Image: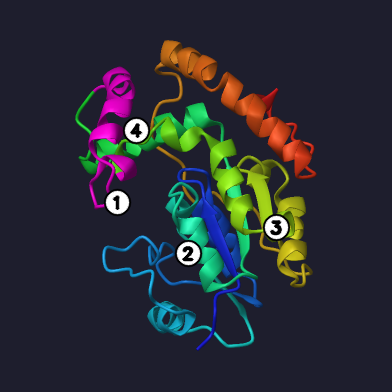
Amino acid sequence: MKTLDFMIAGVQKGGTTALSYFLSQHPQLAIAQGKEVHLFDAPDYLPTWDSEQINQRYAAHFSDASMQQLWGEATPIYCYWPEIAAELQRYNPALKLIVILRDPVERAISQYAMEKARGDESLPLWLALCLEPYRLWRDTGRQQGGARRCHSYCSRGHYSHQLENLRRYFPVEQILVLENSELNNQHQATLQKICDFLGVAADQLPEPASIFSGDYDRRRHQWLRWLLGCYFRFANRRLKSQLIAMGYSPQWTWLR
């Protein structure tokens, strides 16, 4: 059985669907069918599984893939669960991780809009944000519909903690950090960067395309956006320092 070579590990609402789509068109890459496998955070997952047992479960998601391709999947919540990084390292110490970030303010509001549309959120945005710490404190499990999955609007935006956790188990050389607007504004250069990171040819890169965009009104919640911007200011400064230490020169508007 084949072991996965790379993982799009985060973040939710950061553009992982679009990135998976573009990578799936590369002849040397295979993305798991259904995109988000959720194997390592499944209710029946056991830390006692060895790599072969994990590969047997992954095999069903790669029925059309060849052994010569690099295999990967995208489950963006893996970056958020702190306990998953150790399991990924145990599964494959050579695993390469791609993390695509987004302005945490817009990410939080986009997640809220998604949960509202799914019926998993009934509160107005301001109240959902105020109650988030209580919800997360009260419900620490990983069950479907739980607070950590559905109501972690601000919590998921503390990217520096998530990157720091990944770096405990993987060297910097195996982690690629991107920003979601790069797929649109620097499409070819970004895909080139990913191909170089994965070690595959970059002579036939897919053209830009609109894969999915949230249906929430970005003109709404202006005062909440300002408050969230204040809330994330110090977390973003820490993230910028961390990225610089990792060798990046982030020029993203929300990090300035």
Answer with mark 2 or mark 1, whichever residue precedes in sequence: 2
Residue at x-position 47% and y-position 48%: 212
Residue at x-position 70% and y-position 50%: 187
Residue at x-position 28% and y-position 33%: 137
Residue 231 percent location from the top left of the image: 50, 18
Residue 201 percent location from the top left of the image: 77, 72
Residue designated by label 3 = 171
Answer with mark 4 or mark 3, whichever residue precedes in sequence: 4
Relative height, residue 19 to residue 118 (above, below): below
Relative height, residue 93 to residue 244 (above, below): below
Answer with mark 3 or mark 1, whichever residue precedes in sequence: 1
Which is more toward the observer, 77 or 70?
77
Answer with mark 2 or mark 4, whichever residue precedes in sequence: 2
Residue 54 percent location from the top left of the image: 42, 78
- Crowding around mark 2 (Cα neighbors within 10 Å: few <14, some 14 to 19, many 20+) is some
The amino acid on which the numbered mark 4 sits, given as a three-letter code, is Tyr
Magenta segment's dominant SS is helix
Choose mark 2 or mark 1, whichever is in front.
2
Q: Which labelled disc corresponds to residue 87?
A: 2
Q: How far apart are the alpha carbons under marks 3 and 1?
A: 27 Å
Choose mark 4 or mark 1, whichever is in front.
1
- Crowding around mark 3 (Cα neighbors within 10 Å: few <14, some 14 to 19, many 20+) is few
